[in-house]
Amino acid sequence: MITVLMVILCSSVNAQMFHGGKSQKPDKQHKKENIEAMKVAFITRKLNLTTEEAKVFWPVYDEFEARKKELNQAAVSKYRKILTDSLTEKQATDLIDQQIIQAQKMLDLRKEYLVKFKQILPSKKIAKLYDAEKNFRRLLMKELREKRKEKKDK
Protein backbone atom coordinates (compact mmCIF):
# COMPACT_ATOMS: atom_id res chain seq x y z
CA MET A 1 0.00 0.00 0.00
CA ILE A 2 2.69 2.52 1.01
CA THR A 3 4.83 1.58 -1.99
CA VAL A 4 1.88 2.09 -4.34
CA LEU A 5 1.14 5.48 -2.77
CA MET A 6 4.79 6.47 -3.06
CA VAL A 7 4.92 5.51 -6.74
CA ILE A 8 1.75 7.49 -7.47
CA LEU A 9 3.04 10.46 -5.48
CA CYS A 10 6.41 10.28 -7.20
CA SER A 11 4.81 10.20 -10.64
CA SER A 12 2.64 13.20 -9.83
CA VAL A 13 5.47 15.19 -8.28
CA ASN A 14 7.84 14.15 -11.05
CA ALA A 15 5.44 15.49 -13.65
CA GLN A 16 5.09 18.78 -11.78
CA MET A 17 8.74 19.32 -10.96
CA PHE A 18 10.61 17.98 -13.95
CA HIS A 19 8.24 18.14 -16.88
CA GLY A 20 6.92 21.64 -16.73
CA GLY A 21 3.62 20.95 -14.97
CA LYS A 22 2.23 23.90 -13.05
CA SER A 23 1.99 23.39 -9.35
CA GLN A 24 -0.72 25.13 -7.41
CA LYS A 25 1.72 26.57 -4.87
CA PRO A 26 5.02 27.48 -6.59
CA ASP A 27 6.82 28.77 -3.50
CA LYS A 28 10.09 27.39 -2.13
CA GLN A 29 8.41 25.44 0.67
CA HIS A 30 6.17 23.62 -1.79
CA LYS A 31 9.14 22.79 -4.01
CA LYS A 32 11.05 21.45 -0.98
CA GLU A 33 8.07 19.30 -0.04
CA ASN A 34 7.84 17.98 -3.60
CA ILE A 35 11.54 17.13 -3.63
CA GLU A 36 11.23 15.37 -0.27
CA ALA A 37 8.24 13.38 -1.53
CA MET A 38 10.19 12.41 -4.64
CA LYS A 39 13.14 11.37 -2.47
CA VAL A 40 10.90 9.17 -0.31
CA ALA A 41 9.41 7.52 -3.37
CA PHE A 42 12.81 7.13 -5.05
CA ILE A 43 14.44 5.54 -1.99
CA THR A 44 11.42 3.36 -1.22
CA ARG A 45 11.50 2.03 -4.78
CA LYS A 46 15.29 1.53 -4.89
CA LEU A 47 15.33 -0.28 -1.54
CA ASN A 48 12.19 -2.22 -2.37
CA LEU A 49 10.95 -1.55 1.16
CA THR A 50 8.12 -3.67 2.46
CA THR A 51 5.21 -1.91 4.12
CA GLU A 52 6.48 -2.99 7.53
CA GLU A 53 10.04 -1.85 6.81
CA ALA A 54 8.80 1.51 5.54
CA LYS A 55 6.70 2.11 8.67
CA VAL A 56 9.72 1.68 10.91
CA PHE A 57 12.42 3.03 8.60
CA TRP A 58 11.02 6.43 7.56
CA PRO A 59 10.64 7.97 11.04
CA VAL A 60 14.24 7.00 11.88
CA TYR A 61 15.51 8.25 8.52
CA ASP A 62 13.63 11.54 8.93
CA GLU A 63 15.19 12.00 12.36
CA PHE A 64 18.63 11.31 10.84
CA GLU A 65 18.04 13.85 8.07
CA ALA A 66 16.88 16.48 10.58
CA ARG A 67 19.99 16.00 12.69
CA LYS A 68 22.23 16.20 9.59
CA LYS A 69 20.48 19.40 8.58
CA GLU A 70 21.05 20.91 12.04
CA LEU A 71 24.75 20.07 11.91
CA ASN A 72 25.13 21.52 8.43
CA GLN A 73 23.22 24.71 9.20
CA ALA A 74 25.30 25.39 12.29
CA ALA A 75 28.50 24.91 10.33
CA VAL A 76 27.43 27.03 7.38
CA SER A 77 26.43 29.96 9.57
CA LYS A 78 29.84 29.86 11.30
CA TYR A 79 31.75 29.67 8.01
CA ARG A 80 29.84 32.53 6.40
CA LYS A 81 30.69 34.85 9.26
CA ILE A 82 34.39 34.09 9.01
CA LEU A 83 35.02 33.74 5.27
CA THR A 84 36.37 37.07 4.11
CA ASP A 85 39.52 38.28 2.43
CA SER A 86 40.61 39.78 5.74
CA LEU A 87 40.81 36.37 7.37
CA THR A 88 43.71 36.22 9.82
CA GLU A 89 46.01 33.22 10.03
CA LYS A 90 44.51 32.34 13.43
CA GLN A 91 40.96 32.55 12.03
CA ALA A 92 41.96 30.39 9.07
CA THR A 93 43.48 27.80 11.42
CA ASP A 94 40.35 27.83 13.57
CA LEU A 95 38.17 27.47 10.48
CA ILE A 96 40.14 24.47 9.24
CA ASP A 97 39.97 22.88 12.70
CA GLN A 98 36.22 23.48 12.84
CA GLN A 99 35.77 21.85 9.45
CA ILE A 100 37.52 18.71 10.70
CA ILE A 101 35.41 18.75 13.87
CA GLN A 102 32.28 19.16 11.72
CA ALA A 103 33.28 16.23 9.51
CA GLN A 104 33.86 14.09 12.62
CA LYS A 105 30.45 15.04 14.04
CA MET A 106 28.83 14.05 10.75
CA LEU A 107 30.72 10.75 10.73
CA ASP A 108 29.67 10.09 14.34
CA LEU A 109 26.06 10.79 13.40
CA ARG A 110 26.25 8.43 10.41
CA LYS A 111 27.72 5.71 12.64
CA GLU A 112 24.98 6.23 15.23
CA TYR A 113 22.26 5.89 12.62
CA LEU A 114 23.92 2.96 10.92
CA VAL A 115 23.34 1.03 14.16
CA LYS A 116 19.68 2.11 14.13
CA PHE A 117 19.24 1.26 10.45
CA LYS A 118 20.72 -2.21 11.03
CA GLN A 119 17.94 -2.85 13.56
CA ILE A 120 15.38 -2.13 10.85
CA LEU A 121 16.89 -3.22 7.53
CA PRO A 122 19.30 -5.85 6.25
CA SER A 123 22.78 -4.53 5.43
CA LYS A 124 22.14 -5.00 1.71
CA LYS A 125 19.31 -2.49 1.84
CA ILE A 126 21.41 -0.06 3.88
CA ALA A 127 24.11 -0.21 1.22
CA LYS A 128 21.42 0.44 -1.38
CA LEU A 129 20.19 3.38 0.72
CA TYR A 130 23.53 5.17 0.53
CA ASP A 131 23.69 4.53 -3.21
CA ALA A 132 20.09 5.69 -3.70
CA GLU A 133 20.81 8.94 -1.83
CA LYS A 134 23.76 9.66 -4.14
CA ASN A 135 21.75 8.76 -7.23
CA PHE A 136 18.87 10.98 -6.15
CA ARG A 137 21.20 13.94 -5.62
CA ARG A 138 22.71 13.33 -9.07
CA LEU A 139 19.25 13.18 -10.61
CA LEU A 140 18.26 16.46 -8.96
CA MET A 141 21.46 18.18 -10.06
CA LYS A 142 21.01 16.93 -13.63
CA GLU A 143 17.43 18.17 -13.75
CA LEU A 144 18.49 21.54 -12.30
CA ARG A 145 21.20 21.94 -14.93
CA GLU A 146 18.73 21.06 -17.67
CA LYS A 147 16.16 23.56 -16.37
CA ARG A 148 18.78 26.29 -16.17
CA LYS A 149 19.94 25.50 -19.69
CA GLU A 150 16.35 25.63 -20.98
CA LYS A 151 15.83 29.04 -19.33
CA LYS A 152 19.10 30.31 -20.73
CA ASP A 153 18.23 29.11 -24.26
CA LYS A 154 14.87 30.92 -24.21
Image (cartoon, rainbow, N blue to C red):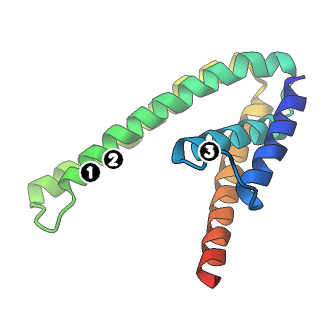
Q: CA distance from mark 1 to mark 3?
A: 33 Å
Which element carries disc 2, helix, strand or loop?
A: helix
Report the amino acid beneath label 1: Tyr
User: Quick check: marks 1 and 2 in contact, CB under 8 Å?
Assistant: yes
Which of the two discs, 1 and 3, sits closer to the camera?
Answer: 3
Please tell me which of labels 3 and 2 falls first in the chain. 3
Please tell me which of labels 1 and 3 falls first in the chain. 3
On the question of residue 68 being in view, the answer is: yes
Q: CA distance from mark 1 to mark 2?
A: 5 Å
Q: Position of residue 101 (x, y in %)?
A: 32, 40
Q: Which mark is residue 79?
A: 1
Could you tell me which quadrant the N terminus lies in? top right
Q: Position of residue 94 (x, y in %)?
A: 18, 48
Say which residue appears at 66% left-offset and 76% top-offset.
150
Q: Which mark is residue 76?
A: 2
Report the amino acid beneath label 2: Val
On the question of residue 96 being in view, the answer is: no
* Front one among 75 and 140: 140
Report the amino acid beneath label 3: Lys
Residue with the mark numbered 3:
25
Which element carries disc 1, helix, strand or loop?
A: helix
142 in relation to 72, above or below: below
Residue placed furthest toward the front: 24
Say which residue appears at 71% left-offset and 54% top-offset.
22
Which of the two discs, 3 and 2, sits closer to the camera?
Answer: 3
Q: Which mark is residue 70?
A: none
Q: How dense is the environment of label 1, judged by Cα within 10 Å: few (below 14), some, or many (20 and up)?
A: some
117 in relation to 104, above or below: above
User: Quick check: marks 3 and 2 in contact, CB under 8 Å?
Assistant: no
